[in-house]
Image (cartoon, grey):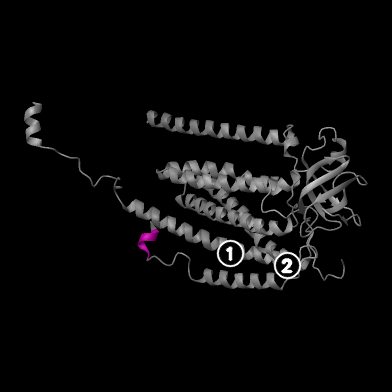
Amino acid sequence: MTPLTTAPGPVFGRRLPLVVGVAAAAGVTAAVLSPPDVVQGDLVRLLYVHVPAAWTAFLSYGITFAASLGWLWRRRPGMDRLAAASAEVGVFFTALAIALGSIWGRPTWGVWWTWDARLVTTALMLFIYLGYLALRRATPDPLDRAKRSAVFGVVAFAQVPLVHFSVVWWRTLHQPPSVIRPGGPTMDPSMLLVLLGNAVVFTLLYVLMVRARARMAATEDALDAAQDTHPLAGAAVSAPQLATARSEKTDV
Amino acid sequence: MTAARTAARGVVGRYKLLALVALGAAAVLVGMLMFGNLNRNLVYYLTPDEALAQQADYPDGRRFQLGGLVVDGSVATTPQGVSFTVTSDIGPAGVEVPVTFEGAPAQLFGSDIGVVLEGSWRAGTFTSDTMKVKHDENYQPAEDPAS
């Protein structure tokens, strides 16, 4: 249990937050200076946050998948903590992608939301991983929790390719992929560069968040292990004892 | 020792069973989605050629979504909104459906843009009151001299 023997440092670290801050400032500057789109105009700038948010969500669930497999293979507690932290951050980025997409959709499509395959599968992905987090909260025993959530983390990953290919397999209002597609990107290099740069920013942000969350979880685990007995709710209340001496007399 | 081992095996067996059930359910679901007739309900919009071919299934007044490209130069303003022609972007070329749209068209509406229209047939013309603009996967700078 290393976290208790070393002095607890800041969970976010010292250098990485600076790096993320500088990179984010550069990303925002690039998005503002990039050319407006021939059809959408300035609305295209929302793409530079919406798409990286969605990609980072995919990355999060990919890491959850790999860490879950890693836990099933080697049974290291750190793998379980990484899987959980990555899923939490993934839920954040999924919700962010949906919200930003909605804000883009209103002026572009004319609607905030539509029941097409991409939007529905993305919402489903959000709820599946919320279910993963709920499962973790619902299982008090650490070993059971790790086992169940590792299986869930592996199976749930099937949702990620479903979301990505939903726009290829079904007719949707959402446009098909522009970057991760056979035949190369259908995006002007000047815009693609900004998009990829912002994807790097989001990935750094992801690393920062997951590392902090995994460190907190490690400290929590160490605290749990250091405590011999877990106080139960209501343990402080003693059972009422009414007139012990007299009841002994009458009972016999 | 044997008791512990059988207990462990029991736990593993239970998880294997659970995983098998989950995998089976997932396989059935994916199979249904990909090969089943469910696809009919999963079609987000009909292309102009499908809409014409299935005109008998959608009598006047039955609503569905029609998707396609706005034909260049076909847009005309009417007292209620706009009228234009929609052609297929993924189906066979040359099939066109006349559309009258009642209401304010979407912000990006114009020639050569994808639209998904909600409405119904009315005497051979698709009458719509809800329009969504379908943006495609191409992104180009506005001042690009090549475009």
Q: Is residue A244 covered in magenta?
A: no
Q: Is residue B67 visible?
A: yes
Q: Is residue A3 covered in magenta?
A: yes
Number of labels in the image equals 2
The N terminus of chain A is located in which quarter? bottom left
Residue drawn 36% across and 60% down? A4
Q: On the image, numbered disc 2 is attached to which residue?
A: A42
Query: Element under label 1?
Result: helix
The residue furthest front is B79
The residue furthest top is A252
The label on residue A204 is 1
Residue A156: where, in percent of width, then height? 58, 43
Q: Are marks 2 and 1 on the same chain?
A: yes
Residue drawn 67% across and 54% down? A112
Q: Amino acid at mark 1?
A: Leu
Q: Chain of mark 2?
A: A
- Magenta extent: A2-6
